Amino acid sequence: MLNWIKKTLAKKRLPAKQPVGKKTSRRSSGQAAGKATGKGSRRRSKKSSRSASTAASTVAGNKDVIVLSRSQHGISRNNIDDHALKVLYRLHKAGYHACLVGGAVRDLLLGHKPKDFDVATDATPEQVSKLFRNCRLIGRRFRLAHIHFGRTIIEVATFRADHDMSQLGIQDDSGRIVRDNVFGELADDVWRRDFTANALYYDIADFSVIDFVGGFEDIQKKRLHLIGDVETRYREDPVRMLRAIRFSAKLGFEIDEKSRTPIYSLGHLLQDIPPARLYEEILKLFHSGHAVRSFELLLEFDLLQYLFPEAAISIKDDEQVKKMLLIAMNNTDDRILNDMRVTPAFLFAALLWQPVNSRVKEFTDKGMPYSVAIQKSATRILSQQSKSASIPKRFTSTMRDIWSLQTRFHYRAGKRAQAVLEHEKFRAGYDFLCIRAQAGEAGTVNELSQDCEWWTDIQKLSPEKQRNMLFETKKSGKPKRRRRSKKPKASHPDHSTDSVDGSKAENKPEGQTDKDLTDKDQADK
């Protein structure tokens, strides 16, 4: 890498770029009229030389930069996604400086399989879009290029520079960056990264790793350190506090003292983050296979109150709630470890169960059935939760099903029990029931344990034996007597009175004459 830098710097400096609209010289125009292939190759070579020269001068100009050659690190292209390599090579051949960056480089150095592959380049999003037909430009806060290969997406970002108060870089009153479309060079981009472990660049040009901030040493020491002034960086993007917790839980890194201390006093800044973005960060925290450790760190730094306010209050009021949540988190981690299907609705249902269940009594005291009261309580809690971290409706409906099933597991015979067993969300509801029993939920320990044991046993039976068990009739005792419906009384002959001439007399109200009846009939007509 260093030899390449020296050679590049020794090359003759390229002529200044012609301003738009200015005519070229006769010599240059004559060369342009030459071979078509020569024109394209010269243009690419000039662009490539200019990009390489810029990168070389950037690295050489920084005395603290460390360049690890291919023999000094363990990153192999065999471990890099083919689609990511295709993007890197195409950008490089087009004359742009392209690097693999972020968590992918960190995970490859640790020997882990990266989940995502991100690319950083000096090409603008519009230039990237011209190179790839399958490119989509996204983002308003910072413009990004997403290159689609079926379900795989390679994210390409342009090198960023220090933001200012211009139209391209804007901060709000709290210091949070709300717009950040300021492009720069590689040496500028590194200072816009969050942690040193994520600020390593794998250069596709010579397969080296470029380190400006000592990230390689921090990875070896399993240390998490925030780049720049810690408080300023947290104010720029408060989500970095959640990212610190996630990386610490996932990688087993220790957050250094300078990076951890401000979290205790700046946690309130998370209230300014859109609920939809917090929801995405919560998924990363709890569905990375390290939910238990992430949950413990959220409690340690007192950040749970800004994600799930009602759950944080319940944990302080009742220690059993924390025990149940840890069991639920551990259950989720085990399923992810065994490549089993998980749904966010399960953990969300566990986090909000105590707030929902504690408010049911308020409705049942008014005479409302328990099954209806729990839905009323769920509506109120979910409405409050949406102000902090919004949960999509496809998951809130599953949460409601899980909570509703808790009121029906006491059925053990007949069609009601069969309906529970055949319910679409039975398995999630059953797991939730057993977690409540295992945690020893106050007031219903024995009942929950018995219900969990009974529903566990019936699942082991064949469908035919399940039906026999649910619909077997009790032979002991007298059979219930069928109740007959009342029949209308028939008119008896003795009730009618005969007149003197043998005809039946009409039943007339007492004190009413024939004349009165005749007048009434005429009036009716």
Image (tube, helix red, strand yellow):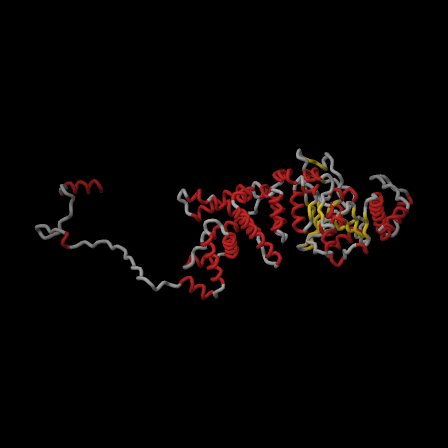
Nearer to the camera, 311 or 187? 311
Q: What percent of the width, then of the height, locates residue 399?
A: 52, 50
Q: How many marks?
A: 0
Nearer to the camera, 249 or 338? 249
Is residue 39 at all visible to an observer of this figure?
Answer: no
Tell me which corner region of the image, top left, top right, bottom left or bottom right, holds residue 82: bottom right
Would residue 14 be found to the left or right of residue 97 on screen? right
- Outermost residue on the left side: it is 500
Q: What percent of the width, then of the height, locates residue 512?
A: 14, 41
Q: What percent of the width, then of the height, locates residue 470?
A: 42, 61
Q: Quadrant of the C terminus?
A: top left
477 relative to 23, above or below? below
Would residue 517 be found to the left or right of residue 353 on screen? left
Q: What percent of the width, then of the height, locates residue 71?
A: 81, 56
16 relative to 394, above or below? above
Would residue 511 be found to the left or right of residue 369 on screen? left
Is residue 221 at all visible to an observer of this figure?
Answer: yes
Residue located at (50% from left, 42% from top): 380
